[in-house]
Amino acid sequence: MSPQEEMKVQWDLFTKHHAKGKWRGTWTSYNYMGDTLDETTASVNLLLNEQTNTVEHTHDIVMGKISSDCETCFDSEDVKTIPVGSYAEGNLRQYRCASVAMVAGPTLMKSGAMSTELVLNHGDGRVRVVYQHAPVWEQGVEPGSCPPHALKLFRTMVSREVLDANVPPSFQSEEKNVPVRGDPRFFRPVPPFNWHKKWAGSSWTWGEQTGDRGWAVDDLDEADAWHGRPTGDTSDVWAMRLPGGILLQCPRVITTGRAGLFRLAWLPEDDAPVGSADDGDTAKLLRVEASVVALEPVIDEENDVMLGFYPPELGSLRCDVLAKYGELEDVSVMDKLKSMGEMGNNGGGELDPIREFVGGNDSGSSASSSSKSSSSADADGGAGAGDDDEPLDDSAFDAIRNALKL
């Protein structure tokens, strides 16, 4: 596509899937260990002005709430509106869209941290995740005495959002007003079996050199089914799976010369109930993956000194919109879950204890994950493989060893 055609496609995707009104949700923040830090009721307002063909972006933050004990009165909220920006065709700033997905960033915050936001839309609901990485230095090096050696994850924000709602989605709100087919149900049980199916659909990819492309996905091979590996492909992946079919994955530490993969997978709907009007409509799987490059040095080749770092950049973006078309064949689902670290070896349904790669005798690495965020490593060559397995590919372990010192 020409630059003008690409701008139009980006604008059309932005206004079709995201600039639809007020996205109300509960912003839940987690620390590196996966513990909840705080929760805030707020809305992301992306309001399209059809006359000027522009979008105004604001945030409504609920600062407090007053509940009325009178049957004829209404509850009131103290809401603070924060302007964020305005957008037009050809000027989406830090946003880039790919099918139903959107990425914002990576952007540098005033604090020096890097923020990367991923969004997946399904009907009148969406999931929004913000990963924040802060500068860190090697052990024994005074912070600020030299350029940072890496960026380390310190905070993750997740928001389940619905369009133009009076209250954020919750179990009570969905029980009272059951979402129609085509809209997500955030608060429902999603067994780990549901991730391991046959999926087909379409894929939208973007790269700096290749631009935007569309692909048909007839089937996902084992290597591409990363949503079925909840703890990621390597030991330097921070991961957490949340109720309602949401899977988060991002780099624990980002270093120079290595692109980091930021991922979000979501199961917004199950198979339609048998005998219903939608019988035959199968489960849906949405995935987005963004590649980010950061801490690339600016070198003065004449004097052979480093002047600083280039701003972080988005290297590539991929969005998959998939539907279930069958069950896995010639494989026991129970064995599949065990091999992916989903269940204990005794088959009782519990997770195995966390096992992580530890470089040398570093003692702090055992605190780099939580039972909420990961289970045992993949048994087909992951970090927790036994002594009788094939030798591990340690191409990424040097970076992990250094990261354990940060």
Image (tube, rainbow, N blue to C red):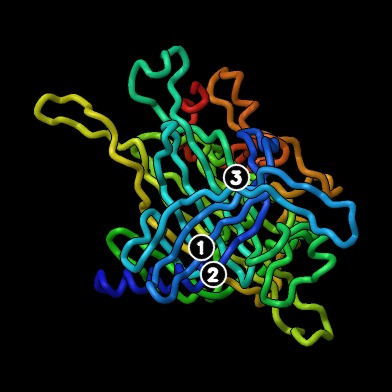
Q: Amino acid at mark 3?
A: Met
Q: Give the alpha-carbon distance from disc 2 to disc 3, as whole Å.
A: 22 Å
Mark earlier in primary sequence (2, 3): 2
Say what secondary structure mark 2 lies in. Answer: loop
Residue visible at 65% across and 71% down in the picture:
284
Q: Nearer the viewer, residue 353 or 123?
A: 123
Say left or right for 295 vs 49: left
Say left or right for 69 vs 9: right
Residue visible at 52% across and 59% down in the picture:
288
Q: Give the quadrant of residue 91.
A: bottom left
Q: Amino acid at mark 1?
A: Leu
Which residue carries the number 2 mark? 20
Residue visible at 48% across and 36% down in the picture:
133
Tell me, for residue 46, which label it has, or none. Answer: 1
Say left or right for 135 vs 347: left
Mark earlier in primary sequence (1, 3): 1
Say what secondary structure mark 1 lies in. Answer: strand
Q: Mark 2: give few (<14), some (14-19) or many (20+) Cα within 10 Å.
A: some
Q: Nearer the viewer, residue 253 or 307?
A: 307
Q: Give the alpha-carbon distance from disc 1 to disc 3, as whole Å.
A: 19 Å
Q: Mark 3: give few (<14), some (14-19) or many (20+) Cα within 10 Å.
A: many
Which residue carries the number 3 mark? 157
- Please provide percent x and percent y for residue 307: 22, 28
Asked if one can make out residue 378 in the rendered structure from this viewpoint, the answer is no
Q: Nearer the viewer, residue 323 or 331?
A: 323
Q: Are marks 1 and 2 in contact (CB under 8 Å)?
A: yes
Q: Quick check: 192 above or below 250?
A: below
Q: Give the quadrant of residue 63.
A: top right
Of circles 1 and 3, the one toward us is: 1
Mark earlier in primary sequence (1, 2): 2
- Please provide percent x and percent y for residue 212: 36, 68
